[in-house]
Image (tube, grey):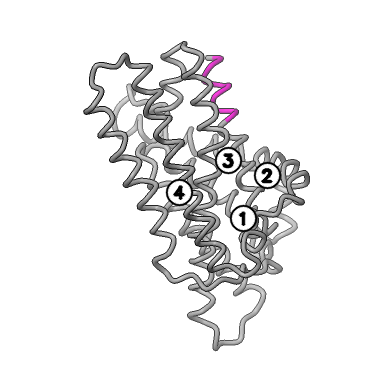
Amino acid sequence: MACWLLKTSLGRKALVDSVPRRNNMPLYLPFIPLFIWFGAVSLAVSTARKLLPDLPAWQSNFLDNIILCIGAIATMAVIVLLVRGHFARRLKGFGLNPKTIPGDFGAALVNLLSIWPIVLAAIILTTYLGKLIFGPEFQLQQHEELKIITTHPQLPLRILIVVVAVIIAPLIEEMLFRGLFQTMLRSFLDARNHQLPITNYQISNRAWLSIAISSGIFAMVHSNTGHWPALFALSVCMGYAYEKSGSLFRPIFIHSLFNAASIITALNQ
């Protein structure tokens, strides 16, 4: 991280060569899969709980995660259809080119290790401020899926949660927040200033602004507000990786590795 800050003038030069993804998305388009993902899945989970109120806790959580997987797959299918209709070069223009996977995985590991101290610092600072404001008993709440996997020892549930956290969630969230929202925001910022001559720094600033806004949205859709600062820092890293590489697989791998590390940590506490 220190080397990156020095080489890029504290990040100002980091994205001057970042090429925007060509697309014709309207501003409202990313909200379509967002509403499907959060609205339909939440409604389905709520309905299932009302229809099957007497299930044991672990089976109820298993059913919730099955519904989440089905909803995520359906939402990803919608995103793929939208991408094919609105992105130049379709999925490759969106950043899903299988040829980049080997290089993206190694780069994702380096990116995650670089940002990890900042994520930890955000967690420590949030905990410190929480204790100052709410008292010494304040603690950051554990993520709901981590709480479930540490509370219930049933193997089928644990396997399903690992699949959701390490595969399903990174895919759907990165396709939505990086692939659609971040791209739409950058295109919108570029379109507003298309008649003005631009410099490399303006290109970089617009890319960073789109990363910051989409990262804010990403953090706020998570229900635990105490996690927002750390999630924002992680999201900025994933957004930067997407803009710098043009590959969506890179932030997907960062997200997946982070979730896997969180699960391993929770199970070993």
Amino acid tagged 2? Asn
Q: Earlier in the sequence, mark 3 or mark 2?
A: 2
165 falls in the magenta region: no
Give the number of callouts.
4
Between disc 3 and disc 4, the foreground one is 4
Q: Is residue 201 above or below residue 168?
A: below
Disc on res. 240: 1
Amino acid tagged 4? Thr
Q: Which residues are magenta?
A: 260-268
Element carrying mark 4: helix
Element carrying mark 1: helix
Label 4: which residue?
A: 75
Label 3: which residue?
A: 255
Circle 4 packing at 10 Å, graded few (<14), some (14-19), many (20+), is many
Tell me the CA gap for discs 3 and 2: 11 Å
Q: Is residue 265 above or below residue 169?
A: above
Element carrying mark 2: helix
Between disc 4 and disc 1, the foreground one is 4
Q: Which residue is at a point 53% across and 71% down the rendered structure image?
A: 187
Q: Quadrant of residue 178?
A: bottom right
* Marks 3 and 4 in Cβ contact (< 8 Å): no
Q: Earlier in the sequence, mark 1 or mark 2?
A: 2
- Where does residue 92 sit, x and y in percent of width and height? 67, 60
Tell me the CA gap for discs 3 and 4: 18 Å
